[in-house]
Amino acid sequence: MLLKDCQYCLNREAIENFGRIAFETETSIIIVFKDQSHKGRMCVAYKKDHVAELTDLNEADRKAYLADVFACARAIKKAYNPDRINYGAYGDALGHLHFHLVPKYKDGFEWGGTFAMNTGKENYATDDEIAEVAKKIKDNWSYEE
């Protein structure tokens, strides 16, 4: 069941508070974060139902969702060539399955530590910059090796 007050379910305009929808797959919403302190920072949110944990998904849906997380990580790697991608699957307060994918660079911002959820409006990308990130991710999206 989808929840009307969940930003990832039916209240998608709430996504506009922190990001922009780049595109959608059959299973996921792919979001570019406004905070681009880490160029290429994305979120992959499960969209077929309101679930909190990977363990709430059946095998087919879990495989499809994790394939989207994988494809997003590959696209970030191809587009931005980070040294690492940090993955965050928080949700204590929100309770909807989503992964943050944050590219990191050796000796770069927040290297060696946990990424901040929001580093401040000074790191917000413009609409054109967000569109550029979305295009790069979509252009590099692939499920194939």
Image: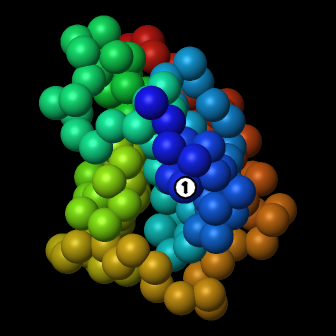
Q: Is residue 101 left or right of residue 140?
A: left
Disc 1 residue type (three-letter)? Asp
Residue 73 screen position, x and y as percent: 40, 39
Q: Which residue is at 24% across, 63% downward? A: 92
Which residue is under mark 1?
Answer: 5
Q: Nearer the viewer, residue 20 or 55?
A: 55
Q: Is residue 21 above or below residue 23?
A: below
Q: Give the position of the C terminus as an image quadrant.
A: top left
Q: Is residue 83 above or below residue 107?
A: above
Q: Which residue is at 54% across, 55% downward? A: 5
Work out whether residue 80 can be spotted: no
Task: Tally the marks.
Answer: 1
Q: Is residue 24 left or right of residue 73?
A: right
Work out whether residue 127 can be spotted: yes
Residue 81 screen position, x and y as percent: 45, 49
Residue 91 screen position, x and y as percent: 29, 58
Q: Nearer the viewer, residue 34 or 143?
A: 34
SS label for mark 1 = loop
Q: Which residue is at 47% across, 68% downward? A: 38
Q: Is residue 48 above or below residue 33?
A: above
Rendering colour mode: rainbow
Residue 65 screen position, x and y as percent: 38, 25
Q: Is residue 81 left or right of residue 22?
A: left
Q: Nearer the viewer, residue 126 or 95?
A: 95
Near mark 1 (Cα within 10 A), the count class, few <14, some 14-19 or many ≥20, is: few
Q: Which residue is at 46% across, 79% downward? A: 118
Q: Give the position of the N terminus as an image quadrant.
A: top left
In the displayed image of the protein, which residue is found farthest to the right?
Answer: 128
